Image (cartoon, grey):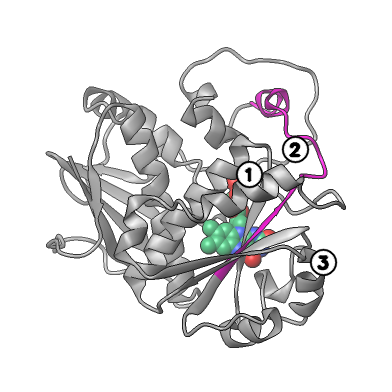
Amino acid sequence: MNSLKLAEKRRSVREYKNRRLSEDDRNYLKQLITEKPLIAEDASLEFIFIEDGEKAAKDLEGGLAGYFGKMIEAPHYFALLSDPKSKCYKITGYVGEWLILNATKKDIGTCWIEVIDSEKTKEVLNIQSDKEVVALIAAGYPKKEYKLSNIYASIKRGSISALTDLGYPNIDSGYSKEIVSSRKSITEFVFIDKWGNVPDIEELEMRGIHEALFYMRLAPSYKNRQPWYFVVRGNEIDLFIKQSDEISEAMQCLDAGIAMFYFEVGLHDAGIKGNWNLSDFDIESEITEDYKAAGRYQY
Ligand SMILES: Cc1cc2nc3c(=O)[nH]c(=O)nc-3n(C[C@H](O)[C@H](O)[C@H](O)COP(=O)(O)O)c2cc1C
């Protein structure tokens, strides 16, 4: 399955079948956390697979994790631990999403879960570590089947389908109960050459990055706020994240890391090989105050 289809298939799963993953699938997930992508070497991360999700969900009730303290019940979880630094949070987002797309390949459903109180979460999950539990990822078989036909069936105007945007014909398989989270169109989060300079699709096509952007917009984000802005120039693409006082630094950095991962997969598919630089680059002076530079892709 190509990456675009995989990204279309992924969505946040909040209801799981009431059974554990098969031993093969559990081993697959446990193996994945030993094979993190290269970027993980730039941060000190610890990903822990929690076998007994039922117990963990009960222990985490009462406001420790989940939007408004509402925990998502799942057969298993990953606990994602990192040093409390913005660069490490971003890498946690990148690697966490890599894990999610790999789980999607095996039809394993997942959902990011915000951790509100790291210390208490470590205590109830019996995790001995100096690092911070930044987030959890729920894992299990989705209660509803997520066959590709369902996803194509949900293609309609304003849906997240990149295929629709790319001009593929509608595929009508007759049914879909799935609610698909809406997404911005790509010209709503890209500038060319400088901040404020909105491109048209033809310009993005000429630079060969339009497909990567269609792919990118499928990235999940905290409360689906899609806080990204890209400035494309020469052989560099800068990612900016809209800041909010109401959202923790960790969640904002996870969104940045997730976006970097998605965009990179899309760019690599388009033959644009490069890497994200997360620290030493000059920031353009004219950017709007409430946006912060998160990384620069150089190719
Ligand atoms: C960093 C992060 C934290 C999230 N935390 C939660 C959460 O605590 N509870 C929840 O139901 N969804 C959570 N989500 C899922 C988002 O709401 C979801 O990705 C977004 O609404 C887009 O929907 P989709 O993933 O189905 O495409 C989180 C997502 C991210 C990226």
Q: Are marks 2 and 1 in contact (CB under 8 Å)?
A: yes
Amino acid type of the residue that numbered disc 2 sits on in the rendered structure:
Glu
Q: Secondary structure at mark 3?
A: helix
**Sequence-earlier tag: 3 or 2:** 3
- Which residue is more in the foreground, 149 or 213? 149
**Front position in the image: 15 or 169:** 15
* Cα distance between the residues tagged 3 and 1: 22 Å
Please identify the residue farthest to the top as the structure is shown.
169
User: Which mark sits nearer the N-terminus, 3 or 1?
Assistant: 1
- Return the disc, 2 or 1, that comes first in the chain's sequence: 1
Instruction: Indicate the quadrant of ligand 1 in the picture.
Output: bottom right
Label 3 sits on residue: 54
* Residue 194 part of the magenta-drawn span: no
- Mark 3 is on which residue type? Glu
Say which mark, if any, is on residue 178: 2
- Per the image, the residue denoted by label 1 is 11
In percent of width and height, residue 31 lies at 55, 50
- The residue at the point 84 percent across, 48 percent down is 17
Q: Is residue 15 above or below residue 116?
A: above
Q: Position of residue 275 (x, y in %)?
A: 24, 46
In the rendered structure, the answer to whether residue 130 lies left or right of residue 78 reads left
Measured in 3D between alpha carbons, the distance from the residue under mark 3 to the one under mark 2, in whole angstroms, is: 25 Å
